Image: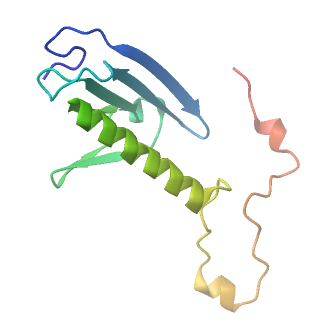
Amino acid sequence: MSLWLNEDRRPARVDRVEIYEACGMSLDLVSTGMCGGDAGHGGRLRLRFGLAEMGATAGVVVDDDEYDAPMYVDVVVGGDAEISLMAQLLKHAVEKLEEWHGNGFCDPYIPEDLVESNEEIPEMGDVPEDFEDHVTEE
């Protein structure tokens, strides 16, 4: 299956985004869009997730085989229905992540010995006063 064109040789649209926080990740989105058919004559979609190439800690599992620190991972689907389904799945994932972690933080893990000792538990998201002294601009 060609990653860039369907059998009717329809050109693809390409978009790339890089996002940086403590590390970076990228996404290349390549799609012919809907072409009116199945994998043979329908659209193509490739999602390339840039992982370790930008310092992210990530792994991939494919059919129970684990791969540590891949530079990138491609997900390719062929056919109009497959593009539609992939879009719906990605939208669902975004909605759930925003619902679960909308404030940007996961619920903190607090060791039981700290909770039982009644020691003060630091608030998630507190930023040290000198935080900006450690931020560098490129």
Quarter the C terminus occupies: top right
Percent position (x, y) of residue 22? 60, 41
Q: Which residue lies furthest to the front in this view?
A: 36
Percent position (x, y) of residue 112? 59, 85
Quarter the N terminus occupies: top left
**Residue drawn at x 33%, y 31% as measured from the top left:** 72
Q: In this view, does 43 lie above or below 110?
A: above
Say which of 81 and 138 sits in front: 81
Say which of 19 and 32 sits in front: 32
Q: Is residue 57 left or right of residue 83?
A: right
Q: Residue furthest bottom?
A: 116
Is residue 30 visible in this depiction of the protein?
yes
Is residue 69 visible in this depiction of the protein?
no
Q: In this view, does 56 lie to the left or right of 30?
A: right
Q: Is residue 59 above or below residue 121?
A: above
**Residue drawn at x 25%, y 15% as measured from the top left:** 4
Say which of 94 and 17 sits in front: 94
Percent position (x, y) of residue 105? 64, 58
**Residue drawn at x 51%, y 25% as measured from the top left:** 17
Say which of 13 and 65 sits in front: 13
Q: Which residue lies furthest to the right in this view?
A: 129
Q: Quadrant of residue 115?
A: bottom right
